[in-house]
Image (tube, rainbow, N blue to C red):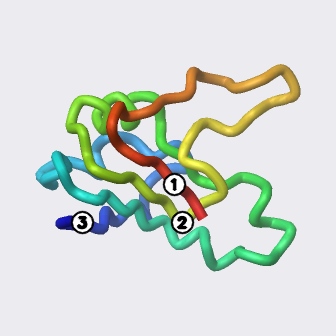
Amino acid sequence: MPAVVVDATRADRAIGPDVFLGITLTDHAVLVRTNFSRYWGAESYFSDHPFLSTHSAEVLVTARPSFVGIDSLTSTTPLTRHGPRTRSWSVRGSRCAST
């Protein structure tokens, strides 16, 4: 499976769709690099982690990658005490993962 690493190390906490501009996503494993994995094993890993914005998720759903991974706690919007801030997403026929 072809793969592409998307550099989101300078993106906002809510990773916008601009990080995917000019990158072939369809039928590729899309690995989003945030460098947040450096906090793995620390208490800070569970707070203020980066995530894909709703618009980014929609771009990925439309592009139909084979797989989406991110080096963050989760790829979706963090939960609040009252549930998710935005809707979650999935890519039919694709797998989504986070560290």
For the point 24% across and 38% down, the residue is 64
Mark 1 or 3 closer to N-term? 3
Residue under circle 2?
71
Please identify the quadrant where the C terminus is shown.
bottom right
Residue under circle 1?
97
Say above or below: 37 vs 80: below
For the point 47% across and 36% down, the residue is 53
Say above or below: 95 vs 89: below
* Pointer 2 with pointer 3, Cβ within 8 A: no
Crowd class of label 1 (few under 14; some 14 to 19; many from 20; radius 10 Å) = some
Crowd class of label 2 (few under 14; some 14 to 19; many from 20; radius 10 Å) = many
- The amino acid on which the numbered mark 3 sits, given as a three-letter code, is Val
- For residue 58, side relative to residue 47 (left or right): left
Which of these two is toward me, 24 or 15?
Answer: 24
- For residue 18, side relative to residue 14 (left or right): left
Secondary structure beneath label 2: loop
- The amino acid on which the numbered mark 1 sits, given as a three-letter code, is Ala
Q: Furthest residue to the front? A: 93
Residue 3: x %, y % from top left: 23, 66
Residue 10: x %, y % from top left: 43, 63
Mark number, residue 4: 3
Q: CA distance from mark 2 to mark 1?
A: 9 Å
Q: CA distance from mark 2 to mark 3?
A: 14 Å
